[in-house]
């Protein structure tokens, strides 16, 4: 049975939730599921904006059929060829051989890569600034390269002020019947997952996100329809403020992220004492064990906090693997503008501090504090002063 919702009278959400997804993109845990959004415009012409992941194909096709109510499908606008939105594209075309695909040249190239064949007759190419009139609505196409792949574009409906924003402004998590962000307490309930989604999916591409935010600022936007997560019709400015911070690599808070890797608990003990000293100074500490908390969650917290502390034991003459993975991930996501402090441990040849410093040295505009607390097996009583000094330096 179909399960759809109206965005407005002539625009229907025809997407679906997947709550059995273990790992989005094979790496990001989705304990709250995932939504794959697709929207059908019922104008003089009918327009479907994107398809959906193959995991939800049955629900998706039922939704499209129901919303079309026997009408032909005139256009499919493809904003992004990543299979979480395009895996069912070929199936849609088989069901609707009348459809014209509206996309840019890069999307057409990927279309042929994912679905070999000749798509020339079916595709209508568009570029930045091109428009498509569907009757009452006029669609304007906005290129958004690297948000999150190079072919990505967005559509702006100037008639009703609707931005179809592709992956931008998405979030992890199933919709669970709610469609609009204002049907939830978004900033209390979903901001953490929106941040985790942003940091890991498009965090690397801050300048490209900034470019799209500039384009969006010139539009009169009343409704935002992303490919994942909730539709925005109220309070969108609050979410844009977060995007401005994240995409310019500015922290949301003065808080401290304290991530530690500890094999037998001695590095953890030093991290605990440091956290206590910081808390005594009124500093908010967000603390994670890298052996327990997946790197993508800690990466998201690094986008949130102004100061980052990494404490790791030496392992195989390197950095303990879970911390090494995390730091590689942070560097890959291009994090910038942070203060960083380090604690190392090693029973006979501690080198993790030096190696962490080298790993993080590539981050732009980051200050790595000179003082690195070195533990030999465990924190010694005479080192408490050093720990206090480190806490004072971090608290600033
Ligand atoms: Fe939701 Fe980049 O795909």
Image (cartoon, rainbow, N blue to C red):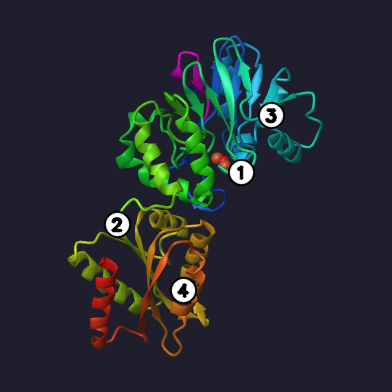
Which of pointers 4 and 2 lies earlier in the amino acid sequence? 2
- Ligand 1: give its quadrant: top right
Earlier in the chain: of badge 4 and badge 1, it is 1
CB at disc 1 and ligand 1 closer than 8 Å: yes
State left or right for residue 237 relative to residue 46. Answer: left
Magenta-span inclusion, residue 12: yes
How far apart, in angstroms, are the residues tagged by discs 3 and 2?
49 Å
In space, the residues marked 4 and 2 are separated at their CA atoms by 22 Å
Q: Nearer the viewer, mark 1 or mark 2?
A: 2
Of residues 386 and 98, which is closer to you in this image? 386
Decide if ligand 1 comes within 8 Å of the CB at mark 4: no
Q: Secondary structure at mark 3?
A: helix
Q: Earlier in the sequence, mark 3 or mark 2?
A: 3
The residue to which callout 3 is attached is 91
Q: Which mark is residue 357?
A: 4
Q: Position of residue 202 (x, y in %)?
A: 52, 47
Rendered residue at 54%/53% (across/down): 27
Q: Position of residue 215 (x, y in %)?
A: 51, 33
Q: Earlier in the sequence, mark 1 or mark 2?
A: 1
């Amino acid at each position: 049975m179909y399960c759809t919702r109206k965005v407005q009278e002539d625009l229907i959400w025809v997407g679906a939730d997947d709550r059995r997804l273990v790992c989005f993109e094979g790496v990001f845990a989705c304990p709250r599921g995932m939504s794959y959004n697709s929207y059908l415009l019922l104008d003089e012409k009918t327009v479907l904006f994107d398809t959906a992941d193959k995991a939800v194909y049955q629900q998706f096709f039922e939704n499209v059929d129901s919303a079309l109510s026997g009408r032909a499908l005139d256009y499919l606008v493809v904003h992004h060829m990543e299979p979480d939105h395009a895996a069912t594209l070929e199936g849609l075309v088989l069901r609707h051989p009348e459809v014209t695909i509206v996309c840019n040249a890069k999307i057409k190239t990927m279309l042929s890569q994912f679905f070999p064949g000749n798509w020339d007759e079916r595709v209508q190419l568009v570029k930045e600034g091109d428009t498509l009139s569907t009757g009452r609505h006029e669609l304007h196409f906005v290129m958004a390269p690297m948000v999150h792949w190079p072919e990505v574009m967005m559509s702006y409906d100037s008639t009703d002020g609707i931005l179809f924003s592709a992956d931008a402004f998405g979030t992890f998590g199933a919709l669970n019947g709610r469609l609009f962000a204002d049907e939830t307490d978004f900033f209390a309930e979903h901001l953490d997952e929106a941040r985790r989604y942003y940091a890991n999916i498009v965090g690397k591409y801050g300048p490209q996100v900034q470019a799209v935010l500039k384009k969006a600022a010139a539009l009169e936007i009343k409704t935002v329809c992303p490919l994942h997560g909730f539709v925005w019709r109220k309070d969108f400015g609050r979410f844009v403020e977060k995007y401005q911070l994240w995409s310019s690599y500015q922290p949301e808070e003065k808080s401290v992220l304290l991530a530690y890797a500890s094999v037998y608990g001695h590095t953890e003990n030093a991290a605990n004492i440091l956290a206590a000293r910081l808390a005594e100074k009124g500093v908010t500490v967000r603390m994670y064990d890298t052996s327990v908390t997946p790197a993508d969650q800690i990466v998201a917290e690094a986008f949130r906090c102004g100061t980052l502390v990494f404490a790791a034991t030496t392992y195989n003459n390197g950095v303990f693997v879970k911390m090494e993975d995390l730091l590689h991930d942070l560097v890959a996501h291009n994090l910038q503008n942070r203060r960083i402090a380090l604690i190392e441990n090693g029973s006979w040849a501690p080198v993790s501090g030096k190696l962490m410093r080298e790993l993080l040295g590539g981050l732009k505009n980051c200050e790595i504090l000179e003082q690195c607390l070195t533990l030999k097996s465990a924190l010694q009583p005479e080192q408490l002063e050093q720990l206090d000094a480190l806490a004072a330096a971090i608290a600033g």
